[in-house]
Image: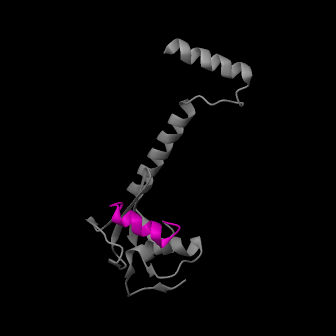
Amino acid sequence: MGTKQDSAVRLDLWLWAARFFKTRRLAADAIKGGKVTVNGAKGKPAKEVRAGQRIAVTKEAYEFVVHVEAVADKRGPASEAQQLYTETPESVERREQVRAQKRSVHAAMPHMDHRPDRRDRRRLARFKRERD
């Protein structure tokens, strides 16, 4: 992995190397869509990232707030990618809260234990007709 201590790399390249996104294209699209901020300001894909900067990345319902420890221009193993940044404790706590909330909502929703058979489909059709 091309880890550099003193230099800078493009934001989309760093997000890809740090494994926040599977492709640089997805990283660039997220940046253009306003899902990534650098030091509190909206970023551009070509913005240079240096060690010591603060980056906030929003993916679906989760927000990652990280401090850049090193920059890399090549994608490597996940263990090396995790050394490129440190996530703030507040960010970890918020993500855990969102995860717990999503789990509780999912657990409260009814799930079918089997595919509906003919009898179930007829009951459902009857229920829908009576409701309308």
Q: Residue at x 36, y 66 (%)?
A: 31
Q: The N terminus lies in which quarter of the figure?
A: bottom right
Q: Residue furthest top?
A: 130
Magenta span of residues: 21-36
| Residue at the spot 47% in from the left edge and 49% down from the top edge | 96
> Residue 109, relative to residue 32: is it above or below?
above
Q: Position of residue 34 (x, y in %)?
A: 32, 61
Residue at coordinates 53% horizontally, 67% vertically from top-left? 22
Viewer can see residue 18: no
Q: Position of residue 80 (x, y in %)?
A: 55, 75
Relative to the observer, which residue lies in front, 100 or 20?
20
Of residues 68 and 49, which is closer to you in this image? 49
Note whether residue 81 is visible.
Answer: yes
When the figure is inspected, residue 119 is found, relative to residue 17, above or below; the finding is above
Against 122, residue 17 (above or below) is below
Q: Nearer the viewer, residue 58 or 127?
A: 127
The relative height of residue 56 versus residue 111 in the rendered view (above or below) is below
Image point (38%, 69%), residue name: 67
38 vs 81, left or right, is: left
The x, y position of residue 52, in whole percent, is 34, 76
Q: In front: 90, or 112?
A: 112
Number of marks? 0
As for residue 33 lying within the magenta part, the answer is yes
The image shows residue 97 at horizontal and vertical percentages of: 45, 45
Q: Is residue 37 left or right of residue 97?
A: left
Q: Quadrant of residue 55?
A: bottom left
Magenta residue check for 16 = no
| Colour mapping used in the image | one colour
